[in-house]
Amino acid sequence: MSAVSLPTGKGDYLQLFSKVKLSSKQEIEEKLKKCQIAQQFCEYLKERGISYSWCIRHPEVISCNESKNYYQRYQEYLGNDYSICKHLLVHERKGEKRVFLIIVDDSKDVDLKELKEQLDCGKLEFVDKEEMHDLLHTVPGNVSLFNIEMDKEYKVNLIIDQELLEKTLLAFHPLYNGMSLFLTPENAIQYLNMIHRKANFMEVPIKKKEWVLEKVI
């Protein structure tokens, strides 16, 4: 297991935060606590034999594009065949209101209408932040594969795009969007087996591009 710029002490955390504008000492302490939780989660994985290739610390990010900007700095280590995983937490608008966590590469624009047909379920819509917190104990921008472990009542159905299995590495936040772990698809599956969670591996449909012909004057 390797680590790139992995924070190890309070001084390292505070040095990271000093690069970001913070409003108060309390906010710094809150971010420090989040980092410590993430580091403890990394230790939790290691103790249970779940390996990861790289651990990168960075300022908090809320989108895949933001993550990409930081990951590019470590291209020498990460290479090009990794996937920044995008997470969509949706539920049926009516009926059973089943919940699905959909994980795909960040480049995919998922067609929820087509996915609804494939899953034979009701119309899908994104959950609000309150439901997200109740289900996965997290907030928008911080959802990760690892949050599925917080779903103790098994309400969330996990869907993983099968294309991710072809990647060399997958990037996930270890419960905090100020750090990222890169692990192989095999290690991700090993993690799911360890927590006794099943996933539906399928070809997640993408939206079809509509080509519009424009008259050139």
Image: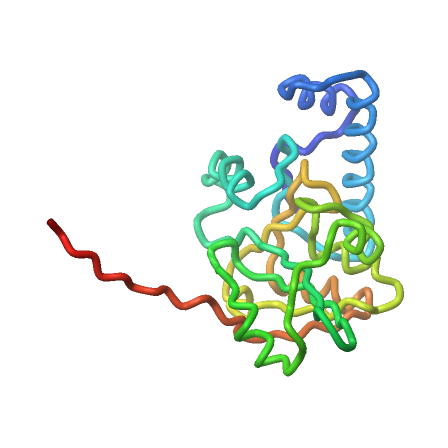
On screen, 2 above or below 204? above
Residue at x 58%, y 81% (from the top left corner): 118
User: Left of 75 or right of it: where is 169?
Assistant: right
For the residue pair 65 and 119, the one nearer the viewer reads as 119
Q: Residue 11 location, x and y as percent?
A: 76, 19
- Looking at the image, the residue that sits furthest to the bottom is 120
Residue at x 63%, y 59% (from the top left corner): 88
User: Left of 208 or right of it: where is 116?
Assistant: right
The structure's colour scheme is rainbow
For the residue pair 206 and 198, the one nearer the viewer reads as 206
Q: Residue 131 location, x and y as percent?
A: 80, 55
Q: Which corner quadrant of the image does residue 4 belong to?
A: top right
For the residue pair 60 and 40, the one nearer the viewer reads as 60
- Looking at the image, the residue that sits furthest to the right is 153
Q: How many marks?
A: 0
- Looking at the image, the residue that sits furthest to the left is 217
Residue at x 46%, y 54% (from the top left corner): 81
User: Left of 38 or right of it: where is 160?
Assistant: left
Residue at x 81%, y 70% (from the top left corner): 196
Q: Which corner quadrant of the image does residue 142 belong to?
A: top right
Q: Residue 139 location, x and y as percent?
A: 74, 46
